[in-house]
Image (tube, rainbow, N blue to C red):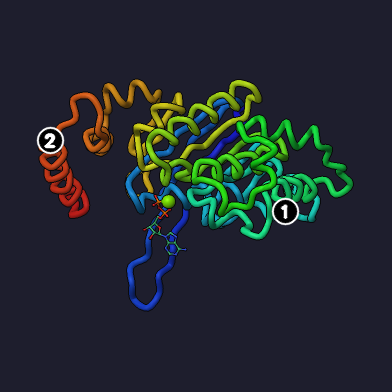
Amino acid sequence: MSLVEVSELHRVFRMGRGAEDVTAVNRVSFAIEPGEALGLVGESGSGKSTIARILVGLEHADDGSAVIDGVDRLRPARSRAERLARARAVQMVFQDPNGSLDRRLTVEETLRRAIRLHDRGADVSAGALAALLDRVRLTERHARAKPHELSGGQRQRVAIARALAVSPKLVVLDEAVSALDVSVQAQVLELLAEIQRESGVSYLFVSHDLAVIRELCSRVLVLFRGTVVEQGETARVLSAPEHPYSRLLIASTPGPGWDPERVVRERMSFTQRMEAVAEGG
Ligand code: ADP
Ligand code: MG
């Protein structure tokens, strides 16, 4: 059985006051196997974060199902213990560790809290803490630092360590490397791949950037306005995209053979096609 089975997931934001409702997630289905990294790509507003937030329980769905490790995540948890068990199974890493790390806590305190939240009797040994830091290539020195004393890449490593502290089955990363410089991005992606090889954790890796998805994800799902327009092996989608929107996304990603003229040309013809579809033509 797959670790994650999402079926016909649907979420509409009711805007009220005569404004048009937004279908952020439109009947989306996918699966993630144990130890697999699935990429979720699409431009801003395509519904990526809404899907990510539904899976970790930060957002509700209107319809569909999301089963993770045998647990129906759309059914409310019945107890604190059940809520904690769910949180332990699925952890999230956000784009901006400034917003998600407590600025008053040292790295060590942040990691101890994460472990204790899930195991109140836990006596967090120095060895366990050192091992956790080592997994994200940080040291004792970083453990004593507060977030503002660290670089962006180091802060993101702390956020990853905090997620790993409870040995999750799935880590949902929402634009987790998007704010980092390209060279730091590459290091964090390499680290994520290494952690996956060692621990067998699964990733749902959300990004608007196909170049970073290519580095980490064996499969990718392409979203356009809440709808999955294409999914498959990353190498296949990148070399032979079937949907015009995937072709457009790939053309927008600087790389070998990148041609800005082609991006503009394809975007124009794509917009015309989509408008025709919207008008029922
Ligand atoms: P992405 O992460 O791909 O940029 P989001 O999932 O954040 O996309 O947003 C998808 C769509 O849903 C967008 O049109 C966005 O404006 C809308 N949306 C997201 N969250 C809310 C919300 N809380 N209230 C109203 N609309 C929202
Ligand atoms: Mg987003």
Kindly indicate the quadrant of the structure image that contains residue 267: top left
Instruction: Say which residue appears at 85% left-offset and 49% top-offset.
Output: 120
Residue 277's tag is none
**Dot 1 alpha-carbon crowd within 10 angstroms: few under 14, some 14 to 19, many 20 or more:** some
Query: Which amino acid, mark 1?
Result: Ala
The residue mark sitting in front, 2 or 1, is: 2
Percent x, y of residue 277: 20, 48
- Foreground of the two, 182 or 83: 182
Q: Read off the residue under disc 2.
A: 262
Q: Position of residue 272 (x, y in %)?
A: 13, 48
Q: Is residue 179 left or right of residue 237?
A: right
Mark 1 secondary-structure assignment: loop
Q: Which mark is residue 77?
A: 1
Q: Residue at x 52, y 57 (%)?
A: 62
Q: Is residue 8 visible in this depiction of the protein?
A: no
Say left or right for 248 vs 110: left
Tags 2 and 1 in contact by the CB under 8 Å rule? no
> Is residue 138 left or right of 114 when viewed as pictured?
left
* Residue plotted at (15% across, 49% down): 276
User: Relative to the observer, which residue lies in front, 146 or 180?
Assistant: 146
Please state the horizontal and vertical placement of residue 60, each as a whole percent of the image: 56, 57
Residue 269 visible: yes
Other residues around mark 2 within 10 Å, as few (<14) / some (14–19) / many (≥20): few
